[in-house]
Amino acid sequence: VQLVESGGGLVEPGGSLRLSCATSGFTFRYYVMKWYRQAPGKEREYVAGVTIDGGRKSYADSVKGRFTISRDNRRQTVSLQMNSLKLEDTAVYYCKAEGHGNNDEYWGQGTQVTVSS
């Protein structure tokens, strides 16, 4: 099983980034996909999630209206479009796969997002 995040980097406040998570080794279309983040000295927190068919999406209040999660079941990828970035969005961002109807879960290694002027 592999989940590989990419797209992180350094961006100024108000800027945008698009994170991607490429997956392999499991049946992607049967897994709920989520993004989490962990800022220095803080607990890992939920950012966004999308159901197996992409029909329902949820967001943490802190990112609602600025971030958009999407998935491509054919390419087995999940993305996070991040707009209007704020200093407090600085964190390592992780994608997570959660089995639908089972207890399987897989994490990526994370990608650093730094928002700074």
Image (spheres, helix red, strand yellow):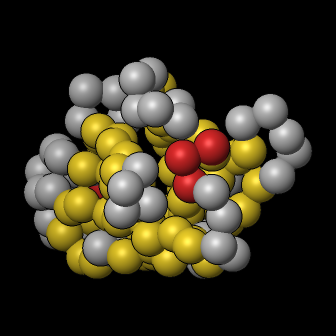
Between 34 and 62, the residue placed more toward the observer is 34
Between 20 and 10, the residue placed more toward the observer is 20
Q: Is residue 110 left or right of residue 55?
A: right
Q: Is residue 86 above or below residue 58?
A: below
Q: Which x, y percent locates residue 104?
A: 82, 52
Residue at position x 85%, y 40% in the image? 102
Toward which corner of the image does residue 17 lie, by quadrant? bottom left
Q: Is residue 114 left or right of residue 98?
A: left
Q: What is the quadrant of the C terminus in the image? A: bottom left
Between 36 and 34, the residue placed more toward the observer is 34
One can see residue 48 in this view: yes
Q: Which x, y percent locates residue 28?
A: 56, 55
Q: What is the quadrant of the N terminus in the image? A: bottom right
Between 11 and 97, the residue placed more toward the observer is 97
Residue at position x 34%, y 27% in the image? 64
Q: Is residue 106 above or below residue 52?
A: below
Residue at position x 37%, y 76% in the image? 6
